[in-house]
Image (spheres, rainbow, N blue to C red):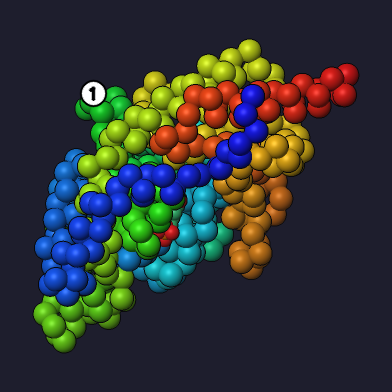
Amino acid sequence: MSTEKIPFLDLVTVHRELQDELVEVLKTALKSAGFIGGPMVQGFEEDFAGFCESRLCVGLGSGTDALRFALIAAGVKSGNIVITVPNTFIATTEAISQAGARPDFVDIDPTTYAMDSGKLREYLEHTCRWDPKTRQVTHNATGKLVTAIVPVHLYGQMADMDPILDLATQYNLKVVEDACQAQGAEYFSQKDNRWHKAGSMGHAAAFSFYPGKNLGACGEAGAMTTNDEQLAHTCRLLRDHGQSKKYFHDIEGYNGRLDAIQAGFLRVKLHHLTKWNEQRRQAAERYDKLFAGAEGLVTIPHQPSWARSVYHLYVVQVEDRARLQQQLNDVGIGTAIHYPIALHLTKAYEELGFRIGDFPIAEKSVAHILSLPMFPGLTADQQERVVTEVLKSLSVTSSELT
Ligand SMILES: *Cc1c(COP(=O)(O)O)cnc(C)c1O
């Protein structure tokens, strides 16, 4: 078997293949010197809204901008609480804090790694009180208003949106999907008996086009999607210093615009996204098959019948993660951990006062997860080698144990 290195993520090959098209974008931008806003940004916004089956898209500087602006535009105010999950990238909770709110958490479903709607219900029923007159939810311990939920479609798989949206309706809460890892993922809604694209179900959604995402820019970029014209309008103001017209500022905003060149690159790459996602799905299926028979040693991703994941990451769980990661590294196989610390236990959130044991499902998964190589263009040979090395490492471990 080959001993060639297998990277965790190969971004070079795909850009080599697209080089001519991407250089054309750059030339077009240089010709007009229209680097901010303009037709390339608008064109991408229309294309991406179409891709997400969402009415509107606002191009932004990053996924973090998208989360922050969507929350502010959805009406989250200073001193509110916004509920999310502890096992996400810190941008999710940074955006909540930067919108002026306090992040609070509910635990995850152990099989999907996404928000457990039963836990969300418990949170709303048992730690909050509902005032039917004002139609507001107050968190008992802090007296703060709970105003929004941010379900995270982690690793490319949808959170179970039907019950989350039902609770949001019942408790008058806004839902902002963190779809940063889920461009193109789909959810089957029992309620209307059809598939929905990630980013089209909540009041708004945030996407990141950080280079390593399923759809990545050649630099920083992001977008929000929504079906609500008012919400999109507010995000357009927020991204551009609150300007409705040059130097006429309706509100104070931010500098959170999408570069025209990045929008142009993204437009080119969007044409390939469906094919790339399909390649990721095929790679995931291949991993699943190769790991069949190793159930006791490796927990592979679970895809519920209501989800079509786009496998931003292929995450397995093993007993001795540190040892497996080291041994794969020793034979030239790249891996990563998404993410090594649950946010409620991260130093930055010490003052929120959470403890070990507060979110046991998330904490347990955090200790065992490992992301294996996953990208379009990953070959069957490479995958076979990854799985062979994983099983070699694990069977040694398990025979040593017995
Ligand atoms: C990447 C990511 C973000 C942030 O996106 P940026 O473009 O890096 O700001 C937010 N949430 C999740 C789950 C992400 O994976």
Q: Is residue 37 left or right of residue 207?
A: left
Return the residue nearer the eye: 258 or 347: 258
Spot occupied by residue 160 in the image (x, y as percentages of width and height): 40, 34
Spot occupied by residue 34 in the image (x, y as percentages of width and height): 16, 72
Spot occupied by residue 75 in the image (x, y as percentages of width and height): 29, 63
Query: Which amino acid does the dot numbered 1 rest on?
Result: Asn
Q: Is residue 371 left or right of residue 235?
A: right
Q: Residue at x 34, y 36 (%)?
A: 276
Q: How many marks?
A: 1
Q: Secondary structure at mark 1?
A: loop
Q: Is residue 143 left or right of residue 239?
A: right
Query: Can I make out residue 317 in this image?
Result: no
Q: Quadrant of ligand 1?
A: bottom left
Return the residue nearer the eye: 275 or 249: 275
Q: Give the labeled residue for mark 1.
A: 193
Asked if 152 appears above or below 142 in the picture, the reply is above
Q: Residues within 10 Å of mark 1 (few under 14, many from 20)?
A: few
Asked if 386 appears above or below 172 in the picture, the reply is above
Query: Can I make out residue 94 in this image?
Result: yes
- To which quarter of the image does residue 40 belong? bottom left
Q: Residue at x 19, y 65 (%)?
A: 27
- Could you tell me which quadrant the N terminus lies in? top right
**Residue projecting furthest to the top:** 293
Asked if 276 appears above or below 306 in the picture, the reply is below
**Residue projecting furthest to the bottom:** 247
Q: Residue at x 23, y 64 (%)?
A: 26
Spot occupied by residue 215 in the image (x, y as percentages of width and height): 34, 47
Return the residue nearer the eye: 180 or 170: 180
